[in-house]
């Protein structure tokens, strides 16, 4: 495996950012406003964890003029399927090197490209991003400004519900085999039998530092998974967090993002 890649954050698309912030706070998360992205089209709130990962709530900023065509495509991928998990990022220490390695393994990578957002305190946060052939998931990041500006390592990483980090992300698709080949190529490693106990699925695991990526596809009838795949495929199906309640969070308050806390 390319040891420089690790899980960075997952994106949850929401219709009303302020309401989503309030709902997650009611579930015991510490949620803070991150700011508006440089394109002026989206803004976010963050839930940062002690393991350095985070969850991003992303909402649209109303603008009278239409966005540029490439911006329109990006917004459609995020928001048209409705609320829910819309993508995730892997963090790189050397994005040029990692992008080159993935290209040498047969992937088509777009980037790195410069991106930024302005925090509420006026501080500019900058990073580089690379994507897989204009797809949202996964994409790859490298910090340009100090990481603590993008992902604070202060008291905002403490959550009343006891959650401390992301231990597993579950990626669902119609067929397991092509997803598995893709992730072998991305990560430069071989899958292992999954340790996830979920009835009615095929599953394999890939291991990153601190986080497991589990790929799943339906095994026969699986109505919940099938309904998810009708909206977003392949995409995050569920995220498992360390610490906290040891059960699923109430999905009516997680804006269609299936979320578990495991002891």
Image (cartoon, rainbow, N blue to C red):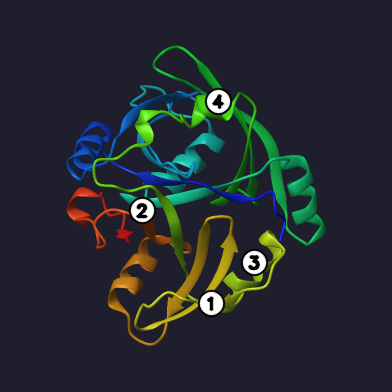
Q: Secondary structure at mark 2?
A: loop
Question: Contact (CB < 8 A) between labels 2 and 1?
Answer: no
Q: Tell me, for residue 116, which label it has, or none.
A: 4
Q: Position of residue 189 (x, y in %)?
A: 69, 67
Q: Position of residue 70 (x, y in %)?
A: 56, 37
Q: Position of residue 109 (x, y in %)?
A: 71, 49
- Residue 154 sits in which quadrant? top left
Q: Secondary structure at mark 3?
A: helix
From the image, tell me which residue sits under label 3.
182
Residue occupying the point 60% across, 72% down: 180
Look at discs 2 and 1 and give the one toward the viewer: 1
Which tag, 3 or 2, sits closer to the chain's start? 2
From the image, tell me which residue sits under label 1.
176
From the image, tell me which residue sits under label 2.
81
Disc 4/disc 2 C-alpha distance (Å): 25 Å
| Residue situated in front as seen by the camera: 24 or 178 | 24
């Amino acid at each position: 495996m390319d040891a420089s890649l690790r899980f960075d954050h997952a994106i949850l698309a929401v219709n009303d950012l302020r309401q989503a912030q309030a709902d997650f706070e009611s579930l015991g998360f510490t949620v803070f406003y991150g700011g508006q992205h440089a394109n002026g089209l989206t803004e976010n709130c963050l839930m940062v964890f002690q393991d350095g990962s985070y969850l991003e709530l992303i909402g649209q900023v109303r603008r009278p003029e239409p966005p540029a065509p490439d911006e329109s495509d990006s917004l459609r991928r995020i928001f048209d399927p409705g609320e829910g998990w819309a993508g995730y990022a892997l963090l790189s220490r050397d994005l040029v090197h990692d992008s080159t390695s993935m290209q040498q393994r047969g992937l088509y990578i777009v980037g790195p490209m410069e991106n930024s957002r302005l925090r509420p305190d006026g501080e500019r946060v900058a990073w580089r991003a690379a994507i897989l052939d204009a797809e949202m998931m996964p994409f790859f990041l490298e910090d340009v400004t100090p990481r603590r500006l993008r992902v604070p390592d202060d008291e905002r990483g403490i959550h009343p519900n006891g959650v401390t980090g992301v231990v597993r992300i579950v990626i669902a698709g119609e067929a397991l085999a092509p997803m598995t080949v893709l992730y072998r190529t991305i990560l430069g490693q071989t899958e292992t039998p999954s340790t996830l106990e979920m009835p009615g699925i095929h599953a394999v695991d890939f291991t990153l530092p601190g986080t497991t990526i589990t790929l799943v596809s339906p095994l026969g009838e699986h109505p919940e998974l099938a309904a998810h795949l009708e909206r977003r495929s392949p995409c995050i199906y569920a995220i498992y967090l360390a610490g906290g309640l040891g059960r699923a969070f109430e999905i009516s308050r997680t804006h269609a993002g299936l979320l578990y806390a495991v002891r």
